[in-house]
Amino acid sequence: DIQMTQSPASLSASLGETISIECRASEDVYSNLAWYQQKSGKSPQLLIYAANRLQDGVPSRFSGSGSGTQFSLKISGMQPEDEGDYFCLQGSNFPYTFGAGTKLELK
Amino acid sequence: QVQLQQSGAELAKPGSSVKISCKASGYTFTSYYISWIKQTTGQGLEYIGYINTGSGGTNYNEKFKGKATLTVDKSSSTAFMQLSSLTPDDSAVYYCARDYYDGYYWYFDFWGPGTMVTVSS
């Protein structure tokens, strides 16, 4: 199985700060990488797919980049509603695998 | 709008089985596969497998073979997951999700609200 190593495990950001979350795949997943946000007690919501494509309705302050084995999610200007857990998903090889998650809090 | 409605929380005894449902609405059910995902605090998110909602064909993560059985009822646009021989390690929140696959990219574009399963004597 492809291992997805996500960092950092937790992050505290100030209002308006730009932050990045990284995911590294143990094998090449090309651009078959998605990012999700999960708020406490809720189900995950798709933010980014195909490594850098913004899902409809997701604010433009979210962006994704990378290909192969290195990927990142950037939030350009932290907002209070961005607090939550973030995780990556590789959809290149079955079984699909997730990063361990990053907990993002507002400082 | 796309909705996936899951059945309610389950409290089950070790050794028993539970069957969780996932009712889809707002789209053509048989046009998308349904996947199932397990979430625990300790292990994070684990992929269980998917069902082809048109044919009923399935593909399981090796780790969950013998544990999970995926079925579908096209007439009611509902997918099911049965978990058998339950142990405390099966205690988790289980999500169904709609698969998006265009021949290259595979991801989950909509998720159900989750079903909490607690295994305890």
Image (cartoon, coloured by chain):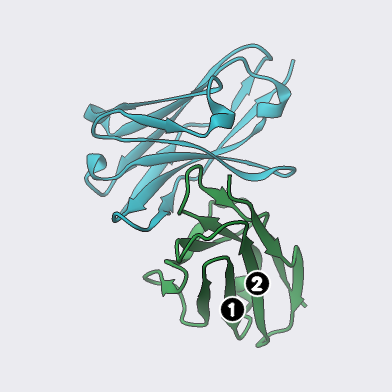
Chain colours: A green, B cyan
Tell me which residue sits at (57%, 70%) in the image. Answer: A71
- Contact between labelled residues 2 and 1, with CB atoms less than 8 Å apart: yes
Q: Which amino acid type corresponds to the residue marked 2 in the rendered image?
A: Ile
Q: Left of B21 or right of it: where is B27? A: left
**x and y percent of residue A96 in the render?**
51, 47
Same chain check for tags 1 and 2: yes
Q: Which amino acid type corresponds to the residue marked 1 in the rendered image?
A: Lys
Tell me which residue sits at (68%, 86%) in the image. Answer: A17
* Cα separation between marks 1 and 2: 7 Å
Crowding near the residue tagged with mark 2, few <14, some 14–19, many ≥20 C-alpha atoms within 10 Å? many
What SS does tag 2 mark? strand
Q: Image quadrant for the C terminus of chain B?
A: top right
**x and y percent of residue B1 in the render?**
30, 55
Tell me which residue sits at (34%, 57%) in the image. Answer: B104
The chain containing the residue under callout 2 comes to A
Q: Which residue is label 1 attached to?
A: A74
**x and y percent of residue B13 in the render?**
67, 15
Q: Does residue B45 appear in the picture of this structure?
A: yes
Q: How many marks?
A: 2
What SS does tag 1 mark? strand
Q: Which mark is residue A84?
A: none
**x and y percent of residue A23 in the render?**
63, 65
